[in-house]
């Protein structure tokens, strides 16, 4: 598929309102007093056998959004990502400090914050687009939903009763580690995903995830550079915007979800590991209020 020309063409032909103004020279002092950021930045990089072109918009989006269903990458064998009642951001149930370090009154919107959103294209050496992704250079906020299938990566730490912390893994229904259409999360080496089994919980039990980087006990979550969703017809290694590191995504639809959460290992046996935040103002009896 080839979509770069369409993207550039859209940028070129988008209507621009007429502006009439007289051009006047600025002094060095006046120019020194001006700071700003370009509205659209273009970065082109080469990595291995692929070229990457990233279009970044210099803006910040603060929002709270609800979606009844997200289902992408559907085939006869299942769905890469399937989430019902998906929400970004939430509504404070009671007054006090939230995980972002700010204080809110009950009923206030606690927004999902996305800074410098981008669209990135991956080309092979023949100039064919083999994948693209959308994400934020920096983001922080809550993601809520009933996750039944997830292809990608979930960055969520698990702590045992002795205080030892380790990174959990996406699992299939048998407790095997997988990044493809996972249904559970836990410790791959010891997980028992049968009803009430140890070291494993269904993804649907994580009703709200705190997107960000772990800030330490009692500290606000830090912004993350690595929240994105990508689509590719072969494996692609996506660089982390504004930071070192990369994420390997296999063919299909892939969602990278870094979280600021650390969960006690024994809680994985609970029916609900992280309760859903409030995402609606009206109680419709569906557990979203």
Image (cartoon, rainbow, N blue to C red):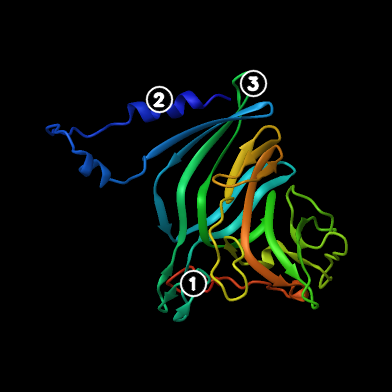
What residue is pinned by disc 1?
101
> Mark 2 or mark 3, which is nearer the start of the sequence?
2
Identify the residue at image location x=41%, y=54%. 61
Front residue of 263 and 39: 39
Q: Write down the quadrant of residue 233 in the picture.
A: top right
What is the spatial separation of the Cα atoms under label 1 and label 2, in whole angstroms? 42 Å
The location of residue 178, given as percent across then percent down, is 79, 50
What is the spatial separation of the Cα atoms under label 1 and label 3, in whole angstroms? 46 Å
What residue is pinned by disc 2?
9
The location of residue 183, given as percent across then percent down, is 74, 57
Front residue of 1 and 210: 210
* SS state under label 1: loop
* SS state under label 3: loop
What is the spatial separation of the Cα atoms under label 3 and label 2, in whole angstroms? 22 Å
30 in relation to 234, above or below: below
Identify the residue at image location x=72%, y=41%. 76
> Mark 2 or mark 1, which is nearer the start of the sequence?
2
Q: Marks 3 and 2: CB-CB under 8 Å? A: no
Q: Write down the quadrant of residue 133 in the picture.
A: top right
Front residue of 237 and 95: 237
């Amino acid at each position: 598929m080839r979509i770069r020309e369409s993207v550039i063409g859209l940028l070129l032909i988008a209507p621009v309102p007429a502006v009439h103004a007289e051009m006047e020279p600025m002094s060095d002092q006046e120019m020194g007093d001006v700071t700003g950021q370009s509205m659209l930045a273009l970065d082109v990089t080469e990595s291995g056998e692929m070229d990457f072109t990233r279009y970044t918009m210099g803006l910040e989006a603060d929002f709270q959004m609800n979606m009844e269903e997200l289902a992408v990458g559907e085939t006869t064998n299942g769905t890469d990502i399937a989430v019902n009642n998906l929400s970004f951001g939430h509504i404070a149930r009671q007054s006090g400090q939230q995980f972002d370090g700010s204080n809110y009154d009950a009923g206030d919107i606690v927004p999902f914050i996305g800074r410098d959103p981008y669209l990135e294209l991956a080309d092979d050496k023949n100039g064919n687009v083999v994948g693209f992704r959308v994400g934020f250079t920096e983001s922080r906020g809550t993601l809520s939903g009933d996750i039944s299938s997830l292809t990608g990566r979930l960055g969520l730490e698990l702590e045992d009763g002795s205080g030892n912390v380790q990174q959990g893994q996406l699992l299939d229904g048998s407790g095997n580690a997988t990044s493809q259409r996972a249904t559970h999360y836990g410790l791959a080496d010891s997980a028992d995903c049968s009803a009430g089994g140890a070291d494993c919980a269904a993804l649907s039990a994580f009703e709200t995830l705190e997107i960000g980087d772990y800030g330490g006990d009692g500290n606000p979550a830090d912004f993350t550079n690595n929240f994105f969703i990508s689509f590719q017809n072969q494996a692609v290694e996506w660089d982390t915007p504004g930071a070192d590191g990369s994420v390997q995504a296999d063919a299909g639809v892939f969602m990278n979800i870094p979280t600021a959460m650390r969960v006690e290992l024994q809680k994985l046996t609970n029916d609900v590991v992280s309760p859903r935040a409030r995402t609606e103002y009206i109680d419709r009896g569906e557990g979203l209020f």
